[in-house]
C-alpha cells in the first residue's frame, strides 16, 4: 500500500511590490517556509522595471520563464537572455552580483533553493536550459508535465540538484487526473498558475494563485484531478537540509558569524566578491540599485 500526500494548508499569494517597480506573488517567505526553499515568487515585470544589481550568497536561484524574455548579467561577465519556457539554474555559492532585467513584459517563477553548509562556499555556476531542452512527460492524453528538475513518469531532467529538488510544470485538461511520485522525505508545495483542481489524498480544492503545502505524512505520491476545468500548476519539492538558517537580505548562511563575515566580504571585495570592485551591469544601468536590506527570507525573532 502506498500513502498519498494530503494538502495541509493553502493561501492566496497576494501581489506585492518587489525589486524596482516589479510585483511578485510570494508563496515561500519568512512567514511561510518549507526547508530547503528560502523564497518562491511568481514575478511580473515590464521594462524599465526589474531587479538591478544585487548580490547573492549561500543558495541557488532558479528562474523559469512563463512569458516574455529577461536579460541577465553578472559581475564575472556572464550575460544572456532567458526566453519563454527557458530555465536558468544559478548556483550563487560563495557569491554572485547580478542584474535581472526584463527585455519584454515578463512573467515567471523564481525559486531560491538553500545549499547545505558544505556547498555554501562553492564557486558560482550556471545550468541553463532552453525551452526545447526541457523534457516533457505525457502520462495520458491531456496531461503534460514539463520536467525542469527531477523525474516524472520515467522522464528525467538533466539539471543537477546539489540540494535534492523536484520542479515541474503540469498542465491537465478538464476531466483528467495525474499521480506524481514524491520521495517520502521530501517537503513541498503546489502553486496553481491557471484554473483550479483537486489536490492530494484529501481532494483539497486549489484555486488560481494559491499555494498548497503538502503534509509530511511519509506519503510517496500526490494525486491531482482537474474536475471542474483545465488546470496548470507548478509542483516544487525538496529534501530538507535541517540546518540552522541565518540571513541578511540575499545572503543566507548557517550562523551569525558567517553573516557578519559575508557582509564584510561584500563591503571589502573579498572571498568571492573580488570582481564587485567598480562593477556595474550594463543592463541594470540607469535604474537605482536594488535595496535588499529589508528583504527577509527568515522570520525576525
Ligand atoms: C529582490 C533581493 C533580491 N524576487 N523574482 C532583494 F534578490 C531580489 C530579487 C528578486 C527577484 C528577481 C527575479 Cl528575476 C524574480 C524575484 C526577488 O532579485 F527583489 C530584493 N528586494
Ligand atoms: Fe538575483
Image (tube, rainbow, N blue to C red):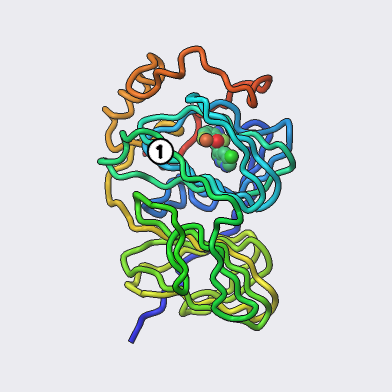
Q: Residue at x 63, y 66 (%)?
A: 232
Q: Which residue does the numbered mark 1 point to in the structure image? A: 300
Splitting the image into 4 quarters, where does residue 253 fall?
top left
Which type of secondary structure does the marked residue at label 1 adopt?
Answer: loop
Q: Which residue is drawn at 35% across and 31% down?
A: 94
Splitting the image into 4 quarters, where does residue 233 fall?
bottom right
Q: Residue at x 63, y 25 (%)?
A: 284
**Which quadrant, please, contains the N terminus?**
bottom left
- Front residue of 35/116: it is 116
Splitting the image into 4 quarters, where does residue 60 fall?
top left
Quadrant position of ligand 1: top right
**Which quadrant, please, contains the C terminus?**
top left
Q: Where is residue 288 drawn, in percent x and y?
A: 63, 21
Up-down relation of residue 50 to residue 67 (above or below)? above
- Front residue of 25/158: it is 158
Q: Where is residue 10 drawn, in percent x and y?
A: 53, 63
Up-down relation of residue 265 to residue 167 (above or below)? above
Q: Where is residue 293 drawn, in percent x and y?
A: 49, 27
Amino acid at each position: 500500500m502506498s500513502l498519498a500526500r494530503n494538502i495541509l494548508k493553502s493561501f492566496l499569494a497576494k501581489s506585492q511590490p518587489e525589486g524596482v517597480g516589479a510585483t511578485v506573488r510570494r508563496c515561500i517567505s519568512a512567514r511561510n517556509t518549507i526547508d530547503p526553499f528560502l523564497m518562491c515568487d511568481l514575478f511580473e515585470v515590464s521594462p524599465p522595471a526589474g531587479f538591478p544589481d544585487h548580490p547573492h550568497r549561500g543558495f541557488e536561484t532558479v528562474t523559469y520563464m512563463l512569458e516574455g524574455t529577461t536579460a541577465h548579467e553578472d559581475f564575472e561577465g556572464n550575460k544572456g537572455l532567458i526566453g519563454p519556457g527557458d530555465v536558468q539554474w544559478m548556483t550563487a555559492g560563495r557569491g554572485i552580483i547580478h542584474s535581472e532585467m526584463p527585455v519584454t513584459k515578463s512573467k515567471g517563477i523564481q525559486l531560491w533553493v538553500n545549499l547545505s553548509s558544505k556547498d555554501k562556499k562553492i564557486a558560482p555556476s550556471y545550468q541553463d536550459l532552453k525551452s526545447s531542452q526541457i523534457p516533457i512527460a505525457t502520462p495520458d492524453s491531456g496531461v503534460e508535465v514539463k520536467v525542469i528538475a527531477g523525474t516524472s513518469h520515467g522522464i528525467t531532467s538533466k539539471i543537477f540538484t546539489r540540494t535534492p529538488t523536484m520542479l515541474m510544470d503540469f498542465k491537465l485538461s478538464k476531466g483528467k487526473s495525474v499521480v506524481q511520485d514524491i520521495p517520502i522525505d521530501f517537503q513541498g508545495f503546489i502553486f496553481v498558475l491557471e484554473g483550479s483542481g483537486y489536490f492530494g489524498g484529501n481532494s483539497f480544492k486549489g484555486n488560481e494563485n494559491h499555494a498548497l503545502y503538502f503534509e509530511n505524512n511519509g506519503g510517496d505520491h500526490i494525486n491531482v484531478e482537474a474536475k471542474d476545468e483545465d488546470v496548470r500548476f507548478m509542483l516544487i519539492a525538496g529534501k530538507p537540509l535541517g540546518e540552522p538558517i541565518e540571513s541578511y537580505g540575499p545572503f543566507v548562511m548557517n550562523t551569525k558569524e558567517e553573516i557578519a563575515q559575508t557582509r564584510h566580504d561584500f563591503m571589502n571585495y573579498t572571498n568571492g566578491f573580488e570582481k564587485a570592485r567598480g562593477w556595474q551591469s550594463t543592463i541594470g544601468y540607469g535604474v537605482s540599485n536594488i535595496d535588499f536590506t529589508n528583504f527577509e527570507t527568515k522570520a525576525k525573532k
